[in-house]
Image (spheres, rainbow, N blue to C red):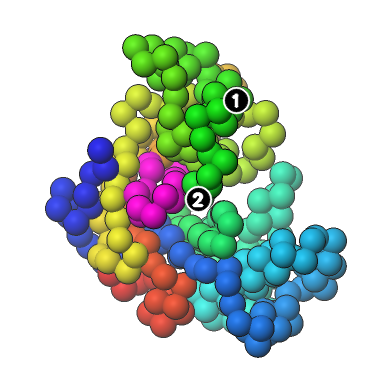
Amino acid sequence: MAEDSSSNLSTTNCSGNSCVTIARLSLHVADDEYARLVNVLSEDEKERSLRRLPEVRRRAVVSRGRLRVLLGRLIGVSPEEVALTTGRYGKPYLSELHQSSIQFNVAHSMDEAVVAVSHQGAIGVDLEKRKTTHNQRWAHLMAPTIFSESEMTQHVEGRGRLSPEEILDCWVAKEAVLKAIGTGIGDKLRTCQLPADLPRFKMSVDAEASSCRLATVVFKDQDFFPGNKIGITLIDLGEGTHLAVARPGQICKLAVRSFDRILYDGLAEG
């Protein structure tokens, strides 16, 4: 059962270094906005978009373009002036030219995207909207590729099967963790062990920020990630949406904001 952040946890303004803000944005835009977003992309981003199928291309352009608009608003430059670089496995970062402490991570599913923004340390986010194909047969096939052996025993014992919802929760949680540490997903999902008491917080878009508990992730290979311990939580937004955020530590202030709200207010309003 999800913990209701509005009743179980203290609310606070989402300001300061411990806060994570998740911007929620639609990938459906009118043609005139789409044209504007194409124009804020770098030449390399435009070239990459042309390699995609038309429907996928449009979502990719909107996602990257709106990311640029959002970051430009936060660091005080125009969207086309946002300088981005990538890590070894393709994770995007703000260039050192901006001298900003902001770290961010992006995820998208179907017609929606989220951008997690933090002023302190690594951040990872993942999103999956449940589809009709996410059925029991899909869950049976996916389980061995996501769960470690001990997790399989823990989840299946006494019930005999895993639900699609459990698979989706585990999937987004592990991808958020791996995106936070910047190693790429690859075949690493089974290398991290999620805690049995994985927290889930019920939150509303544009409500007050809340203090959320993060559960520590254990890595099967201790040499795989020797840095700070990574914490993870699921975020329950309803609507068949599976969302997880990961960052170092065991607690953080968390807010979910609409794209338009952040453009208007920035990150500091609760």
Which is the main secondary structure of the residues drawn in magenta? strand
Secondary structure under tag 1 reads helix
Residue range (magenta): 233-249
Q: Residue at x 50, y 68 (%)?
A: 25
Q: Position of residue 146 (x, y in %)?
A: 56, 27
Q: Position of residue 59 (x, y in %)?
A: 66, 66
Q: CA distance from mark 1 to mark 2?
A: 18 Å
- Residue 270 appears in the figure: yes
In the image, 30 versus 169, the foreground residue is: 30
Are circles 1 and 2 on residues that touch, CB within 8 Å?
Answer: no
In the image, 3 versus 69, the foreground residue is: 3
263 relative to 197, above or below: below
Q: Position of residue 194 (x, y in %)?
A: 44, 28
76 relative to 177, above or below: below
Q: Residue at x 19, y 56 (%)?
A: 6
Secondary structure under tag 2 reads strand
Q: How many marks?
A: 2
Magenta stretch encompasses residue 71:
no
Image quadrant occupied by the N terminus:
top left
In the image, 251 versus 8, the foreground residue is: 8
34 relative to 163, above or below: below
Q: Which residue carries the number 1 mark?
A: 141
Magenta stretch encompasses residue 236:
yes
**In the rendering, which numbered label is found on residue 184?**
none
- Residue 228 appears in the figure: no
Image quadrant occupied by the C terminus:
bottom left
Residue most extreme to the bottom: 32
Q: Which residue carries the number 2 mark?
A: 129
In-image side of 187 versus 238 (left or right)? right
Upstream in sequence: badge 1 or badge 2: 2
Residue 142 occupies quadrant: top right
